[in-house]
């Protein structure tokens, strides 16, 4: 289905979807172990928070349905099944190259009971250090490219609610390596010990 048909159907739900994504990001940043996680773990934590938020906020909305099928979670809005993922800088999803993943990317994955539905991805693009969100979008992927996208906000569209970066100075004190200090400073640091 073209964007011109999808956008008016999805539009009433976009603010809540956007809020679920942004709130999940903040919840991840508030995790006391966030600074210990590797990038993959951070992405999984945020994705789990997004799914939790979607379940919590959309469970009572009549025209939507929450679906768990074939290891996937979807939010159904009319003929659209929306899954939630981190997006790369081109707003594409990244998947292990399985047959199921290829079928999903090409709009050929049949979800039992939902034949003919269009699969969309909703998610966020972060900077390379996962310290801030650069954009959020709903996309329709078709093969290696997005056929269309609806931006939920981004720096190019005045998206200003970016999370404040953590103050790592307090979490990870940085000390100069002694072997990189000038000779006279090395001697001073020995005296202080």
Image (cartoon, grey):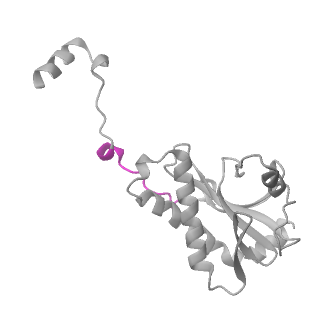
* Residue 115 position by quadrant: bottom right
Residue at (86%, 66%) from the top-left corner?
A: 2
List x then y, in percent, for residue 81: 76, 70
Residue situated furthest top in the rendering: 183
24 vs 184, nearest the viewer: 24
Residue at (44%, 57%) from the top-left corner?
A: 29
Residue situated furthest left in the rendering: 191
* Residue 186 position by quadrant: top left
100 vs 146, nearest the viewer: 100
Left or right of 29? Residue 116 is right
List x then y, in percent, for residue 21: 57, 65
Residue at (84%, 61%) from the top-left corner?
A: 109
84 vs 167, nearest the viewer: 84
Residue at (57%, 55%) from the top-left corner?
A: 44
* Residue 21 can be seen, yes or no: no
Q: Is residue 66 above or below residue 25?
A: below
Q: Is residue 41 above or below residue 53?
A: above
Q: Is residue 40 above or below residue 67?
A: above
* Residue 117 position by quadrant: bottom right
53 vs 101, nearest the viewer: 101
Quarter of the figure that contains the N terminus: bottom right
Quarter of the figure that contains the C terminus: top left
* Residue 5 can be seen, yes or no: yes
Chain part drawn in magenta? 160-171
Magenta segment main secondary structure: loop
């Amino acid at each position: 289905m073209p964007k011109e048909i999808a956008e008016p159907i999805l539009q009433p739900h976009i603010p809540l979807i956007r809020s679920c994504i942004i709130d999940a990001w903040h919840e991840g940043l508030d995790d006391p172990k966030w600074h210990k996680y590797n990038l993959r773990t951070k992405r999984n934590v945020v994705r789990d928070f997004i799914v939790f938020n979607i379940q919590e906020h959309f469970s009572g909305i009549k025209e939507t349905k929450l679906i768990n099928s074939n290891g996937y979670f979807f939010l159904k809005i009319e003929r659209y099944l929306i899954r939630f993922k981190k997006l790369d800088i081109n707003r594409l999803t990244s998947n292990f190259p399985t047959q199921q993943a290829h079928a999903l990317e090409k709009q050929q994955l049949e979800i039992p009971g939902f034949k003919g539905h269009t699969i969309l991805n909703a998610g966020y693009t972060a900077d390379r250090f996962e310290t801030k969100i650069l954009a959020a979008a709903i996309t329709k992927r078709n093969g290696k490219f997005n056929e269309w996208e609806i931006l939920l906000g981004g720096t190019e569209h005045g998206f200003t609610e970016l999370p404040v970066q953590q103050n790592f100075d307090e979490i990870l004190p940085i000390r100069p390596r002694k072997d990189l200090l000038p000779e006279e400073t090395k001697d001073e640091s020995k005296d202080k010990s």
